[in-house]
Amino acid sequence: MEVKINKGILSLVEGDITKQDTDAIVNAANKSLRGGGGVDGAIHRAGGPKILEECIKIGGCETGEAVITTGGNLRAKYVIHTVGPVYRDGLHGEPRLLENAYRNCLKLAATKGIKSIAFPSISTGAYGYPLEEAAEIALKTAINCLKEDTGIELIRFVLFGQNALSVYEKKLKELI
């Protein structure tokens, strides 16, 4: 599913984020930036050791913040690493932290002149964020970015599984 917003495109696809040809892909990282499971582990494996070398030099990343490294062996030139919140009950700042994670990735991309970026669904795997709530935050943040004309031309959400794609498509239809 694709929608045009201002001068940009918001796209939803099911697939493998490590195979995206966007300028940057986003890694749902942990605070240590040392790789891990899920999307994080897949990006580190596919991108090779150069990504980990740069992550070690950076030293870490706080929840809601974002840092950038090379894309290593990936098609994407860059990986933007962000740490989403671990979901407890939604009453401990999780929505704000998740919005910050998306917004800070987009700000960093804009400052680096990145025109296209692919996101996973941050915090909805091992961190337990409810998919519908996370999708709304992710999509609202992306829509606002495209409305602001930051220079980003394509924001793609690469979703794992048909269920995640369906939830994002339903939520996007409600928001536009």
Image (cartoon, rainbow, N blue to C red):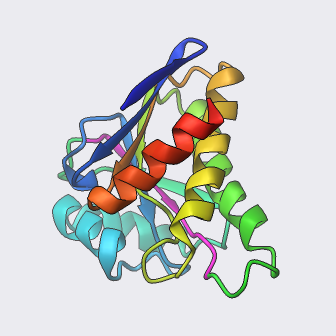
Say above or below: 43 vs 110.
Answer: below
Along the horizontal axis of the image, is 151 left or right of 104?
left
Q: Could you tell me which residue is drawn at 53 percent across and 25 percent down?
A: 152
Q: Nearer the viewer, residue 79 or 121?
A: 121
Q: Is residue 34 magenta?
A: no
Instruction: Point out residue 163 in the picture as x, y percentages from the top left corner.
Output: 34, 61
Q: Is residue 75 above or below residue 15?
A: above
Residue 78 coordinates in the image, percent (x, y): 37, 45
* Quadrant where the C terminus is found in the figure: top right
Most extreme residue toward the bottom is 88
**Residue 40, image x, y percentages:** 35, 71
Q: Which residues are magenta?
A: 76-86
* Left or right of 109, for residue 72: left
Judge by depth and name the residue closer to the eye, 130 or 29.
130
Q: Residue 55's quadrant in the figure?
A: bottom left
| Residue 2 vs residue 48, the one in the foreground | 2
Q: Which residue is pictured at 24% across the width and 69% down the height?
A: 42
Q: Residue at x 66, y 43 (%)?
A: 141
Number of labels in the image equals: 0
Residue located 30% across and 50% down the image: 71
